[in-house]
Amino acid sequence: MGSLVQTSNSPLIPRFRTSHRILEEARVQCRSGVRCRLVEPLKFENGKPSTPALPADKDPSFLARPQLGNIVSRKNDTRLRIFSGTANPSLSQEIACYMGLELGKINIKRFADGEIYVQLQESVRGCDVYLVQPTCPPANENLMELLIMIDACRRASAKNITAVIPYFGYARADRKTQGRESIAAKLVANLITEAGANRVLACDLHSGQSMGYFDIPVDHNNQPVVLDYLASKRVCSDDLVVVSPDVGGVARARAFAKKLSDAPLAIVDKRRHGHNVAEVSLQRWASHVLL
């Protein structure tokens, strides 16, 4: 006799009777047309998968993964931008031609009240942007234009912004010579930094310590460029003299003279009696020539 199990209808029912009842119910369902679901084989509406056959005139090399070098070079062609201000557009054009690039499209205009409007005419998102804008006279106009150009590039999501300032205005106001004077060089450095510039490229600052006014990297050593230019001219060393325009430039003039095969050095005796007033005596200049 089979073992007993407990169900909801009857407390104790033999196990074999329960199994028999389940089989009977399954037979009834099969007679009534109910079928068990079987796992159907995979159906391919477009046919069985197979390796695609390439035409004879097709080169399978296009399926190969592109080389990393090609991708990098393609990106480098588009991530460098050079924009020019209105201070010296001819210089900016020469720089772009030397780099083998075209100047970026930019719209700069002035309103009736003298305000400056700047709009970039192309995308600079993720690009390295160089803004060529010397702060030559009128210094205030060109400086303000540079600041607005930097701000426009920063708001356009440029990756790096380099301010190229061949002539850095207010560089001579780098210290206090009298009481109650301002140090305008520090102020201009703060303005350029706060506007959003990441680097400053200048040709020759009035003093090397002016780099300390910036909280961003500054490059201003143009000595290699000038030396290469003089070397291309093939100047005879016997006809070469390096002249310092004043006492403050003696150190730089001496560095140039040393690089030029220890060329003779001359110092001009210049005295300032006021702002924009300088006196140079030719006789004193001749007597101060150091050979």
Image (tube, rainbow, N blue to C red):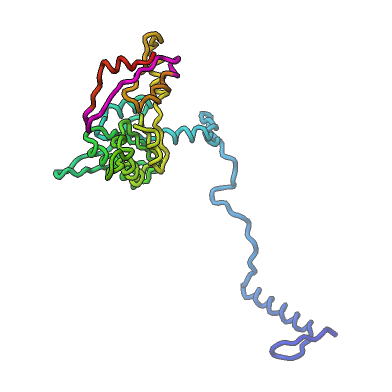
Q: Which of the pair 97/176 is nearer the observer?
A: 176
Q: In this view, does 50 lie above or below 274?
A: below
Q: In which quarter of the image is residue 251?
A: top left
Determine which quarter of the picture holds residue 102: top left
Residue in the picture at 26% in, 41% down: 144
Q: Nearer the viewer, residue 266 or 45?
A: 266
Q: Horizontal and vertical percent for residue 216?
A: 41, 42
Residue 214 is inside the magenta segment: no
Toward the right, the furthest residue is 1
Where's the C terminus, which quadrant? top left
Look at 85% across and 85% down and name the residue there. Answer: 1
In which quadrant of the rendered view does residue 35 lie? bottom right
Q: Nearer the viewer, residue 249 or 234?
A: 249
Q: Where is residue 4 in the image (x, y as percent from the top left)?
A: 80, 86
The residue segment tinted magenta is 258-277
Residue 228, visible in the rendered structure: yes
| Residue 265 in magenta stretch | yes
Question: Could you tell me which residue is drawn at 33 percent across and 38 percent down?
Answer: 174
Q: Find residue 130 and report its horizontal and vertical position in percent.
A: 36, 35
Q: Tell me, yes or no, if residue 104 can be seen here.
A: no
Residue at image location 25% in from the left, 32% down from the top? 136
- The count of marks equals 0
Q: In this rendering, would 248 be left or right of 86?
A: right
